[in-house]
Image (cartoon, rainbow, N blue to C red):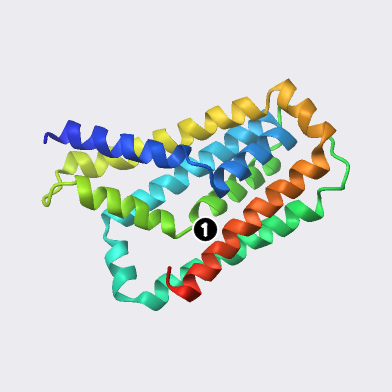
Amino acid sequence: MSSLGVFLSIIAALSVGAMSPGPSFVMVSKIAVSRSRMDGLAAALGMGIGGIGFSILALAGLTALLTQFGWLYVGLKIAGGVYLTYIAYKIWRGASEPLEIGRETADRSALTRSFATAFLTQISNPKTIVVYASIFAALLPKTIPLELFIAIPIGVFAVEAGWYTIVALAFSAQHPRRLYLKAKAWIDRAAGAVMAGLGLQLVVSSVTGR
């Protein structure tokens, strides 16, 4: 298979994974609907940068290291699960608090906070590294051309940031915001419950080995 064919196959596989519901989707949609469109776009950028990190780690062979040192992988899963559970607690605690929707032009500190929250949510799930590495192992040739080393992180950024930009634009529209404001407490608690479930799943799987 040509380098272009390999690249397109990897990007197609990762696109399916990016669009699957998970903590990243919950976080970006929550930021977009409750803050501002610019905050949502900053969160999408954070997801894209996190994707670049995952792709570089996978290309560098981190998965082999995690396989060799099982305790390291377990530690990463526990840390990721604890972080997601903490985020879930913050979402749940703020469910009953009144909300003033952010302006379309958010200040730099707010955008930085949205970016950082999304980035940390993205990288808190070490299973994603394994997914990336599995796709790469299945599709990359044994000798990886230089152009693929350069193109894959760029393509991953386009997939992650592109998809979550769509999510941010959709959830920051007026109609979703009106619905959110009407049922904020229930929506936040549902989002918190989903996030907590994902975090606890990481912790439990690290203990059971599944």
**Direction from residue 193 to residue 19 in the image, left or right:** left
Residue visible at 82% across and 44% down?
185
Residue at screen point 25% across, 32% down: 8
Look at 62% across and 45% down and name the residue there.
Answer: 27
Q: Quadrant of residue 85?
A: bottom right
Horizontal and vertical percent for residue 152?
29, 40
SS label for mark 1:
loop
Q: Residues within 10 Å of mark 1 (few under 14, many from 20)?
A: many
| Residue for point 82% across, 33% down | 181
Quadrant of the image containing the N terminus: top left
Q: Which residue is mark 1?
A: 124
The answer to whether residue 162 shows anywhere in this view is yes
> Closer to the camera, 201 or 123?
201
Q: Amino acid at mark 1?
A: Ser
* In-front residue for pair 157/138: 138
* Residue 52 x %, y %: 39, 46
Residue 139, picture quadrant: top left
Q: Quadrant of the C terminus?
A: bottom left
